[in-house]
Image (cartoon, rainbow, N blue to C red):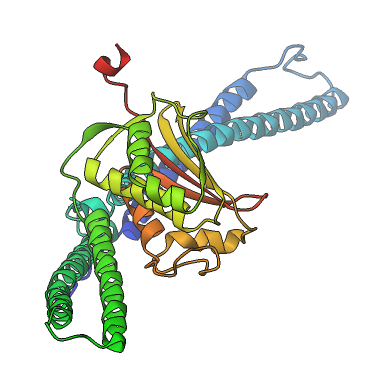
Amino acid sequence: MRKRRRPARTVRLRFTVLYGVMFLLSAVGLLAITNLVGLGGMRVSQSAPPGTPPVEPATLAAATDRIAWLQAQLADTHAAQSRQLLIGSAVALTVMAVVSVVLGRVLAGRVLRPLRMITAATRRISADNLHERLAAQGPADEVKDLADTIDELLERLESSFVAQRRFVANASHELRTPLATMRASLDVALAKPEPVPPQTAALADRLRTELDQIDRLLEGFLMLARTQYGALADHTMLSLRRLATVALDARAAGITTNQLTVDSASAVDDSAWTRGNRTLLTHMIDNIIDNAITHNHEGGWIRLATIMDGTTVQLVVETGGCLLDQEQVDRLAQPFQRLGTDRTHSGNGSGLGLSIVAAIAAAHGGSLDLRARPEGGLCVAISLPAAAVPAEVSA
């Protein structure tokens, strides 16, 4: 670990110098204005006031009156001069206070401008562009030291993200080989000419089911790693209505088997288009439809709607059922979180479906909203950035 050298010039020193000079100039200006006002008052006081009596008094009584009159005039002059100095000082203080506030704001803005630039750059950097750095320029002060520390933190975060993505991908790929070997060994054992005992056949079916579950779990890990830490290479124009229709048609058998009623014709907007990766968005909608079919009661219903709302498009999938706790529903977007098997026809879910949906939506600049319906059941709403409807479709 490199030794961090002490900054040569600190922000505190720069603030001290700048504000010290500012207040020093303010004091000089205040004194200059006060002295100018005072000198003007003294020049006024040196002129002879009107109604001056004769210079040479004839008698002692007249001289005494003259002295008293001069003393009164001198007192009045001093009072007027004091009032003039007081008014001038108040005006000068007000002017310099305003000037000091303006100068302080300007100087503080110039000093703190690097901090604002660091804040804006840090907010711009996310998990998708951790390779970017602040690379702050300037003197070796606390601001530069803070920027360098943030760059080091971003470097460690990038290394951690890359290592996590590589581990998930490698582990998922490496685990598929022994799984395939185990599945092939089961098939070979069951394909022997001699009769297979019923217990062995039942055990083989159980093992094959568990292997399929592990395979789906690994596939979910790969999808999460690709979505959260991978780049979206393909961006095409896609209709949410068409993707949802294809997903429903592909699952018509499961819908019929579970005796579910699907309502999708009344609230489907063909203008709800977005731009994104076809594979990921298809997987996202497939997961939502699968979740609506699996986590439903026999004879239940599914309501699907696509909505165009200004700059966003929404895909809303609602299902009926029992009353749910909103706090538990909020945790469904986290990996391995499920509401239990009482709402499902099968307890084989991996708990990654909605977390994958949330990751894919976030990767496309959207969001996932899960709400427990007051009447019972679940409402899943996905918001994505809207895209213009292609010209050929509009025509």
The quadrant in which the C terminus is found is top left
Left or right: residue 98 compared with residue 282: right
Residue at image position (39%, 69%) is 348
Could you say which quadrant of the image residue 192 lies in? bottom left
Residue at image position (37%, 38%) is 244
Above or below, 51 relative to 162: above
Residue at image position (75%, 14%) is 52
Above or below, 135 relative to 46: below
The spot of residue 269 in percent (x, y) is 44, 26
Figure disc tally: 0
The quadrant in which the N terminus is found is bottom left
Residue at image position (71%, 28%) is 80
The spot of residue 382 in percent (x, y) is 43, 43
Could you say which quadrant of the image residue 50 lies in? top right
197 or 342, nearer to the observer: 197
316 or 309, nearer to the observer: 316
The spot of residue 26 in percent (x, y) is 46, 40
The spot of residue 233 in percent (x, y) is 15, 44
Above or below, 111 relative to 296: above
129 or 234, nearer to the observer: 234
Left or right: residue 151 compared with residue 84: left
Residue 377 visible? The answer is yes
Residue 144 visible? The answer is no
Above or below, 96 relative to 128: above
